Image: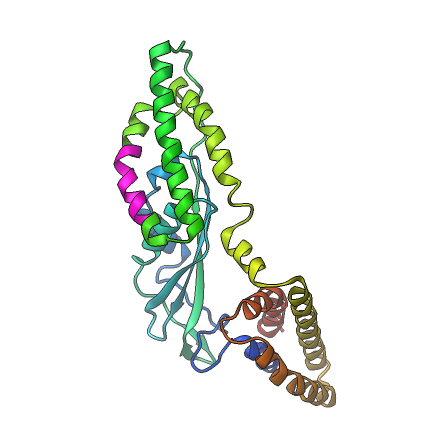
């Protein structure tokens, strides 16, 4: 019975881009694995990760999600940042680089046959907790020097944000490399937990907060909202509810072994599927939003398929 539920689940989501014309699968009966297991995977991954100096100086932390395709022979391809860290382009680049160093996976399979399957890895960037601040009275000369460095750092931040808002990732990466020597110098000059670092943070905080205001939400989400009107979003939610409801009905009918009900539901959905395929063109903002809304109930259906 579990294979039949799985087939139904895959059929219900096929219109949204899963399994089309050699398109990679989002889910497979056997998902890709890494030789040696997850422990080996993340050990190798974090050996290749370097925390960018600019983000470190700005105390930017977060998790970057990298998505790629594991081909039928296990080769990872088509790497992309599925979700990055707000204001942390350097973190995105570092995570992307590390994932590209991993080498081959064990391919995903469906009914024992290797398939092209999407795979997502989360890479966390965390800074160490601050050490106690040393007791030191800063002189006027020291304060003036810190203020100068803070202005330079604010200029760097402003330049980086300007390019990120413009979406010019090539120049962002180039500028980040240009700033790395300066950031390395500042790190040595302002030891972690020192009173010098604390004062520098105080000077930089206002311009950092101002820069962050230019990112009210994660960029990908903001851009997505701009593309879709409230009316479109409402319609997508309605269609997602319909798909999830149909999936639930299919699973229940399978559990009850109600063949007549299954045939009726299949006929009903076939009539709707053609309309949905036209309404949600492949690669469009509408299709992406629909996939996000439908994903949780897809996962539930897949669990039912694999567990019953």
Viewer can see residue 138 = yes
Q: Position of residue 205 (x, y in %)?
A: 47, 29
Q: Would you say 228 lies left or right of 265 here?
A: left
Helix, strand or loop for the magenta stretch, by majority: helix
Q: Camera-side residue: 234 or 186?
A: 234
Q: Residue at x 41, y 53 (%)?
A: 167
Q: Is residue 36 above or below residue 263?
A: above
Q: Would you say 226 lies left or right of 82 here?
A: right
Q: Residue at x 39, y 59 (%)?
A: 37
Q: Would you say 167 lies left or right of 102 here?
A: right
Q: Quadrant of the C terminus?
A: bottom right
Q: Position of residue 82 (x, y in %)?
A: 46, 59
Q: Residue at x 72, y 81 (%)?
A: 253
Q: Position of residue 238 (x, y in %)?
A: 70, 70
Q: Is residue 115 above or below residue 177?
A: below
Q: Position of residue 131 (x, y in %)?
A: 43, 24
| Colour mode of the rendering | rainbow
Q: Quadrant of the N terminus?
A: bottom right
Number of labels in the image equals 0
Q: Would you say 116 lies left or right of 223 here?
A: left
Q: In terms of image quadrants, where is residue 132?
A: top left
Span colored in magenta: 173-183
Viewer can see residue 55 = no
């Amino acid at each position: 019975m579990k294979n039949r539920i799985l087939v139904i689940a895959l059929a219900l989501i096929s219109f949204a881009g899963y399994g089309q014309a050699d398109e990679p699968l989002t889910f497979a009966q056997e998902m890709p694995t890494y030789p040696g297991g997850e422990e080996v995977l993340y050990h190798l991954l974090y050996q290749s990760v370097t925390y960018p100096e600019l983000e470190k100086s700005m105390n930017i932390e977060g998790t970057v999600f990298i998505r790629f395709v594991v081909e039928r022979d296990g080769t990872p391809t088509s790497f992309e940042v599925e979700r990055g860290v707000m204001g942390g382009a350097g973190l995105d680049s570092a995570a992307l680089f590390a994932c590209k160093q991993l080498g081959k996976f064990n391919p995903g399979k469906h009914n024992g046959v290797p398939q092209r399957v999407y795979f997502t890895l989360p890479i966390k960037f965390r800074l160490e907790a601050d050490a106690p601040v040393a007791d030191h009275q800063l002189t006027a000369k020291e304060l003036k020097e810190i203020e100068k460095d803070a202005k330079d750092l604010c200029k760097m931040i402003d330049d980086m944000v300007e390019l990120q808002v413009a979406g010019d990732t090539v120049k962002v990466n180039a500028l980040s490399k240009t700033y790395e020597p300066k950031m390395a110098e500042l790190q040595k000059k302002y030891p972690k937990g020192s009173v010098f670092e604390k004062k520098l943070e105080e000077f930089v905080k206002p311009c950092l907060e101002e820069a962050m205001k230019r990112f009210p939400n994660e960029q990908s989400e903001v851009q997505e909202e701009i593309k879709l009107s409230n009316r479109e979003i409402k319609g997508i939610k309605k269609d997602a509810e319909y798909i999830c409801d149909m999936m639930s009905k299919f699973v229940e009918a399978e559990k009850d072994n109600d063949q007549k009900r299954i045939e009726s539901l299949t006929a009903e959905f076939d009539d709707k599927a053609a309309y949905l395929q036209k309404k949600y063109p492949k690669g469009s903002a509408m299709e992406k939003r629909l996939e996000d809304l439908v994903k949780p109930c897809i996962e539930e259906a897949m669990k039912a398929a694999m567990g019953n």
